Image (tube, helix red, strand yellow):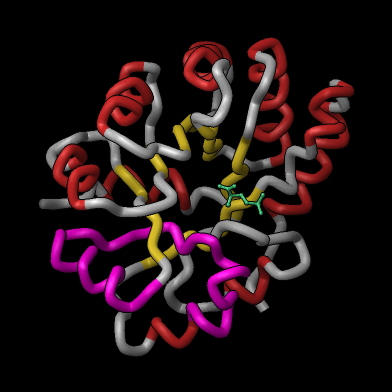
Amino acid sequence: MTQNLAALFPIVKAAPVVPVLIIEDVKTAVPLARALVAGGLTALEVTLRTPAALECIRAIKGEVEGANVGAGTILDEKQFDAAVAAGSTFLVSPGATPRLLAHADGSPVPLLPGIATASEAMALLEAGYGAAKFFPAEQAGGAPYLKALSSPIPGVMFCPTGGVSLKNAPTYLALPNVMCVGGSWVAPAAAVAAGDWAAITTLAAEAAALKAV
Ligand code: 3PG
């Protein structure tokens, strides 16, 4: 098995933060994506947690220049295929089951599977993977825990997600095994509901300017 890192790395490394989006109303998808891209965040993870998610991916793909739209919360093969068909350029899963990894094998659209332990990281290496989501990052042990994995297992690069914020992101970004972080803080539900796209562009710009400390 292999993971298409040649496709994945340019997408997720384009900015320090990958917004994690839970979009309820398809009408907000395009202006939300435009606001994030205007702030400098181009890799957008639309989670498959709402009935509108696939339509949102199609809309962003078709209408938002500069966006790399991906699908998150991929739990099974059916969701994998639907997300690819909708035009996703990357896929994110909270976990890494043998079935999902087997299904992803050979797909040109890269999968970023989720893991949280050394054994899971070793299993991913055995499966030909070199990049993973560290999930749920803060709850699983945060940056000190992830740092402890970097020395024995340097071959897996992570996107920590779950409880990551503007405040704690720089500590993650300073780790040698972190390629980006993911988070929902750049698209607060209240700002999306209010159509406050300027506020979201400001949050995105702050996130895009993050530096490792
Ligand atoms: C998720 O998949 O829900 C992500 O981990 C987002 O977590 P956050 O809302 O804590 O950023």
Image location of residue 179, percent across then percent down = 47, 63
Image location of residue 151, percent across then percent down = 36, 89
Image location of residue 96, percent across then percent down = 30, 54
Give the vertical position of 200 relative to 160 (above or below).
Answer: above
Please name whichever residue, 213 or 125, is drawn nearer the observer in this view of the structure.
125
Please name whichever residue, 143 or 43, is drawn nearer the observer in this view of the structure.
143
Image location of residue 52, percent across then percent down = 57, 16
> How many numbered discs, if any?
0
Residue at 62% from the left image edge and 43% from the top image edge = 19
Give the vertical position of 20 relative to 174 (above or below).
Answer: above
Horizontally, residue 34 falls left or right of residue 172, namely right
Residue at 54% from the left image edge and 72% from the top image edge = 140
Residue at 68% from the left image edge and 51% from the top image edge = 208
Residue at 63% from the left image edge and 73% from the top image edge = 212
Q: Quadrant of the C terminus?
A: bottom right
Q: Report the magenta stretch's main SS.
A: helix
Horizontally, residue 158 falls left or right of residue 2, namely right
Horizontally, residue 99 falls left or right of residue 133, namely left
Answer whether residue 137 is magenta in the image: yes
Segment colored magenta: 117-146
